[in-house]
Image (tube, rainbow, N blue to C red):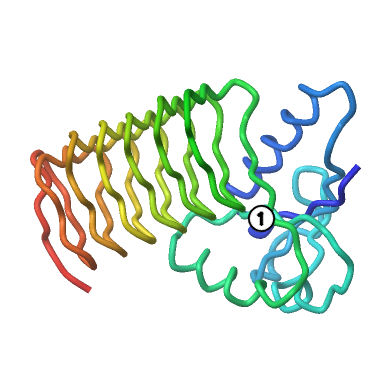
Amino acid sequence: MKKIVIIGAGGFGREVKVLIDQINASLDKPKYHIEGFYDDDQNLPHLINGLPLLGSIKNLLEREEDICVAMGVGIPQVKKNIVEQLKSINFDFPILIHPNVYIGDDVKIGAGTVICANNILTCNIVVGSFVTLNLSCTTGHDSNIGDYSSFMPSVNISGEVNIKEAVYVGTGAKIINQLEIGANTTIGAGAVVAKSLPANCTAVGIPAKAIKFH
């Protein structure tokens, strides 16, 4: 089995632990041995859902062995900052996909991406690296999702949507077809995006409108 550690011991990190367990359970022979969590919050318990807290990100950087690393962090910029620290180390960032995810024709998925249960990705889709597709999202044909982007449960992405790097989309939001979402933009929970959105903004409402820029 491959040794794997999870970055982030919060709620999503614990969900990634469950996801890896479910991947293992679906195979004739388990693929991963989960060693534990790395998290900069050292006030967390030493044992989390049966796994040890192994230390901080700095401690992970000090490891020299070849191990797999799973991203259990959902905030795009935090993910990006962590990955930029880790890229100099010879770590493997596997793609983690729940066994019941539906993936159609010509779907490309980048390293370190996590796709949770009940997702549907239809066809001719490009999903970047270190993307988070949380529970029950749908992604339509000919869509592109940029690196480090995160989608909370039940997000619906229609066809021919171009989502740039480090976009965060809240629970239950909907993006209609043939739109572009600029880099580093946040879309609020329940929003309906009916027009393209620029980079570096926060958009909320039905229809979604930019309410601030950062």
Identify whether 142 is placed above or below 62. Answer: above
- Considering the numbered disc 1 on the image, is that residue within a helix, a strand or a loop? loop
Point out residue 184 in the picture as x, y percentages from the top left corner. Answer: 31, 64
Identify whether 164 is placed above or below 154. Answer: below
Residue that appears at 33% across and 30% down: 141
Residue that appears at 43% across and 43% down: 126
Residue 50 lies left or right of residue 22; in this view the side is right
Q: Residues within 10 Å of mark 1 (few under 14, many from 20)?
A: many
Asked which quadrant contains residue 84, the reply is bottom right
Query: To which residue does mark 1 refer?
Result: 9
- Amino acid type of disc 1? Ala
Residue 205 lies left or right of residue 149; in this view the side is left
Residue that appears at 41% across and 25% down: 122
Asked which quadrant contains residue 33, the reply is top right
Residue that appears at 80% across and 51% down: 4
Q: Quadrant of the C terminus?
A: bottom left
Point out residue 7 in the picture as x, y percentages from the top left corner. Answer: 67, 59
Q: Quadrant of the N terminus?
A: top right
Identify whether 119 is placed above or below 56. Answer: above
Q: Nearer the viewer, residue 105 or 85?
A: 105
